[in-house]
Image (cartoon, helix red, strand yellow):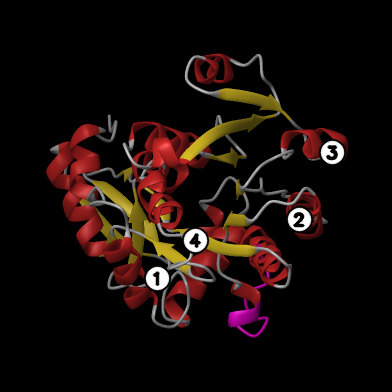
Amino acid sequence: MSNTLAVFGATGVQGGSLINYVLNDPELSQKYRIRAITRDVDSEKAKQLKEKTEVVQADISDEASLEAALEGVHTVFAVTVPSFGPDGLEIEYNNGKTIADVAVQKGSKYIIFSTLPAVSEISGGKYPHVTMFDAKAKIEHYIRGLPIKSAFVSLGFFMQNLHTQPFLAPQPAPDGTWVLSRHISPKNQIPYIDAVKDTGTIIGAILAEPDKYEGKTFCAAEKMYSLEEIVALMSKASGKTIVYKQVSLDEFKNSMPFAPDVFADGFSFQEEFGGYWGPGSGDLATWAAENARGRLSTLEEYLEAHPLQLS
């Protein structure tokens, strides 16, 4: 008999990737029956999901809806949405805590949580503004103390962000070239993952062997790319001349139209404390890629399939 797998954020990048992966995997599609959880069951994406699997409405603000959604669920995949207000960390933490508490209350056996590194803690408080990372790390810590089996996935930079965050993309220069600017060294390495395709490839490994990966964290990236490598791949795929320019911290922050302290602290943390996940980030990413349930897409493959629109 198949176990019910509840997937939060079912119409989002991570949840959608996981659902597609499980439905198309011959073994996992027999092992798990998916229950897609979304706030709006009438959205276009939810309607498309209804053609493939069970879709259930639930909202974090309505605990009764969560209890109904997790009735009879064996395994939960949980992802929380960042909150950028002054109380954002506690709001997101409480949302994740509520999901975990209801999962335990309803008798779920396993929870897989989409976490991120504790930037403030690892840096000894030097970089306090990456609260959406710290919130997820705090949720992870809470889940590890609950009477339920758990595993974690910590995704690197989404390759999709090259399109969805244009303010971080290369910008045109007067001489006809394009410039990718950061305040960190071009030797710094960034972990990239095709989140749409490969979130499921990573979590699929946990679903296939939950006991093997209990308590583990997949620091998930296809590989670590230096900023020099990134602009070279961008140039090759786009046919444009793209270069990297290291700028001052103030210049970088002034170029950010949104949450400048968050991005500045995030990149500074990576440079000073050994990478995206802190010390040993490269080894952590290598382990995750080696243990994924299939080969992960490369940045070159992604850029060839999804060219940067530079004009």
Q: Nearer the viewer, mark 1 or mark 3?
A: 3
Vertical comparison of 14 with 182: above or below: above
State the residue at coordinates (31%, 36%): 26
Which residue was labeled with disc 3?
61
Q: Earlier in the sequence, mark 1 or mark 3?
A: 3
Amino acid identity at mark 2: Val
Badge 4 vs badge 1, beta-carbon distance below 8 Å: no
Which residue was labeled with disc 2?
104
Badge 2 vs badge 3, beta-carbon distance below 8 Å: no
User: In the orientation shown, which residue stands out farthest toward the bottom?
Assistant: 124
Q: Nearer the viewer, mark 4 or mark 1?
A: 4
Prevailing secondary structure of the magenta residues: loop
Label 3 – label 4 distance at C-alpha: 25 Å
Amino acid identity at mark 3: Ser
Label 2 – label 4 distance at C-alpha: 22 Å
Which residue was labeled with disc 1?
184
Q: Earlier in the sequence, mark 2 or mark 3?
A: 3
Q: Earlier in the sequence, mark 3 or mark 4?
A: 3
Amino acid identity at mark 1: Ile
Which residue was labeled with disc 4?
154
Q: Nearer the viewer, mark 2 or mark 3?
A: 2
Q: Nearer the viewer, mark 2 or mark 4?
A: 2
Give the quadrant of the C terminus: top left
